[in-house]
Amino acid sequence: IRELKSIGVGVYFEEQNIDTSNMSGELLTAVFASIAQKESESLSAKMRWSYQYRMKSGTFLPGSVPFGYEIINKVIVVNTESAKIVQYIFNAYLAGESLTEIAKHLNEESSLDGIAQLERKWYPYTISRMLSNELYIGNSLWQKSYTTDTLPTRQVRNRGEHEQYYVERNAPPIIKRDLFLAAQELKSIRGEKFAASNGRCEYPFHGMIYCSICGSLFKR
């Protein structure tokens, strides 16, 4: 409104009978905006409470589910074809393949052990998140992230600021529990080795060659 006023354009709100071209109009606009914001914050708090109540009672249904699942008639069910890829990822990781190698195979090969590929791009961090998702053994951890109260709102990772809710057996499992736990243990071991080496790997020029134009690190 102020930007428009600076070039001589006023805004007239018919419902509130406010004309921003005069000083009283701008003041009233600020008052109405403040009231609207409070109403929005109140509604948001009520919805957040509703989500948390359903999470705690085990009746919460997310808007989307991880790869391998789908929601049909408000029920989380397994997608048979994509579930095969989830199982392949876990088996390949425990067989010794790295996240990068698994993503490469999924991107380059049209089929893996008779599993038809889907039209999507795979990344190592996607594989990593899938390997740590407890829904694949039929359990759910709700409120891993939350929306901030202040405007503009943003989604941030929950690091203990809000209570989390762990619900068991709220979805059919794709991966056996012992397989899932073995993947978590292997991820932990690999992470410790990476930290112990200070993020360096066996390649002699790792982290040493920079672009002279943008300053980014070169990658093999």
Image (cartoon, rainbow, N blue to C red):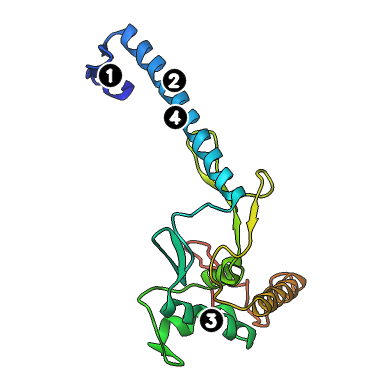
Tell me which corner region of the image, top left, top right, bottom left or bottom right, holds residue 11: top left
Q: Name the residue under label 3.
A: 87
Residue under the image location 54 percent in, 73 percent down:
127
Q: What residue type is labelled 2?
A: Ser
Q: Where is residue 190 in the image (x, y as percent from the top left)?
A: 70, 76
Q: Are marks 4 and 1 in contact (CB under 8 Å)?
A: no
Q: Could you say whether the residue bearing mark 3 is in a helix, strand or loop?
A: helix
Is tag 3's residue or tag 2's residue first in the polypeptide sequence? 2
- C-alpha span from label 1 to label 2: 20 Å
User: Which amino acid, mark 1?
Assistant: Lys
- x and y percentages locating residue 100 in the rendered image: 54, 79
**Amino acid type of the residue that numbered disc 3 sits on in the rendered structure:** Gln
Asked whether the viewer can see residue 58, the reply is yes
Number of residue marks? 4
Q: Position of residue 146 (x, y in %)?
A: 56, 46
- Residue 160 lies left or right of residue 140; in this view the side is right
The residue positioned farthest toward the bottom in the image shown: 113
Picture disc at residue 5: 1
Give the quarter of the figure containing the C terminus: bottom right
Query: What is the spatial separation of the Cα atoms under label 3 and label 2, in whole angstroms?
Result: 52 Å
Q: Nearer the viewer, residue 195 or 18?
A: 18
The answer to which of marks 4 and 2 sits earlier in the sequence is 2
Structural distance between the alpha carbons of marks 4 and 1: 26 Å
Which mark lies nearer to you, 4 or 2?
A: 4
Q: Residue at x 51, y 77 (%)?
A: 86
Mark toward the start of the polypeptide (4 vs 3) = 4
Q: Mark 4 points at which residue?
A: 40
Q: Assess whether mark 2 and mark 4 are in contact (beta carbons under 8 angstroms).
A: no
Q: Nearer the viewer, residue 51 or 1?
A: 51
- Cα separation between marks 3 and 1: 60 Å
Which residue is tagged 2?
Answer: 34
